[in-house]
Image (cartoon, rainbow, N blue to C red):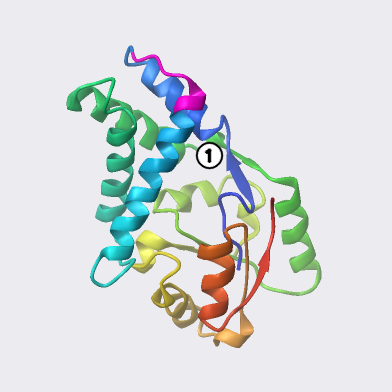
Amino acid sequence: MFDVVGTLVEPWPTVPVAYQFAARRQGIECSAEDLRGRFAAAWQRQEAIDAAAIPPYATSRTREVQRWRGIVHEVFAAEAQGGVRELVFADLWGHFADPRSWRPLEQGQRLVQAALGAGCGVALASNFDERLMAIAEAVDPLRLATHVFASSELGWRKPAAAFFRAVEARLKATSGELLLVGDDPRLDVAAARSAGWRSLAVGG
């Protein structure tokens, strides 16, 4: 099982630059470095909302749209009214749905090939939403996966144990049969181990 963003692929251009370009198309000028900090803060606020939900980290397609709308609106709260921020959100939602906005990570490609060479099955297990389904059909090495598990489709986000239980149920597998490869120490490595999976940390 592979995490996706930061493990196998990365956004291109980077998230701050993509936000900068989308804002510019609506007449808003911001520096990419400033947007980087704002995005990180808005992301953490949405993570805290999910952690405090009942039950924690439950999600859906509706919640994932709400999450990203909240992030974009917060990032540009100082520069634009709600209507303009909504246009930026729609622009960015479409941008990150486009397979051309993602590029493979060399290390991820090597790991997928190594897993296949060792006779392992390869699947994706991500906190992405339903947009991942189309991206996974078009971008290497995601196209090599036989199963794609996105949080919005499972109903749970990592680090919830229910995310891992849902994957096990769909694969008809036990926790001891599964290894998660990911770049996030909390959402991937620690969460997988807590769920009884093996895990492998990659990246910086």
Residue displayed at 49% across by 30% down: 16
Neighbor class of circle 1 (other Cα within 10 Å; few <14, some 14-19, many 20+) is: some
Determine whether, in the image, residue 160 is placed left or right of residue 105. Answer: left
Split into 4 quadrants, where in the image is the N terminus?
bottom right
Residue 194 x, y percent position in the rendering: 52, 79
Q: Does the magenta stretch include residue 71?
A: no
Q: Type of residue at label 1?
A: Pro
Residue 195 x, y percent position in the rendering: 51, 80
Dot 1 falls on a residue whose secondary structure is helix
Q: Can the viewer see residue 147?
A: no
Determine whether, in the image, residue 201 is placed left or right of residue 73. Answer: right
| Relative vertical location of residue 187 with respect to residue 178 in this rendering, above or below | above
| Relative vertical location of residue 196 with respect to residue 153 in this rendering, above or below | below
Determine whether, in the image, residue 110 is placed left or right of residue 5. Answer: right
Residue 189 x, y percent position in the rendering: 59, 68
User: Which stretch appears magenta?
Assistant: 28-34
Residue displayed at 31% across by 32% down: 89
Q: Does the magenta stretch include residue 30?
A: yes
* Picture quadrant where residue 85 is located: top left
Q: Could you say which is closer to the camera, residue 3 or residue 32?
A: 32
Residue 158 x, y percent position in the rendering: 44, 66
- Look at mark 1 in the image and give the residue it sits on: 99
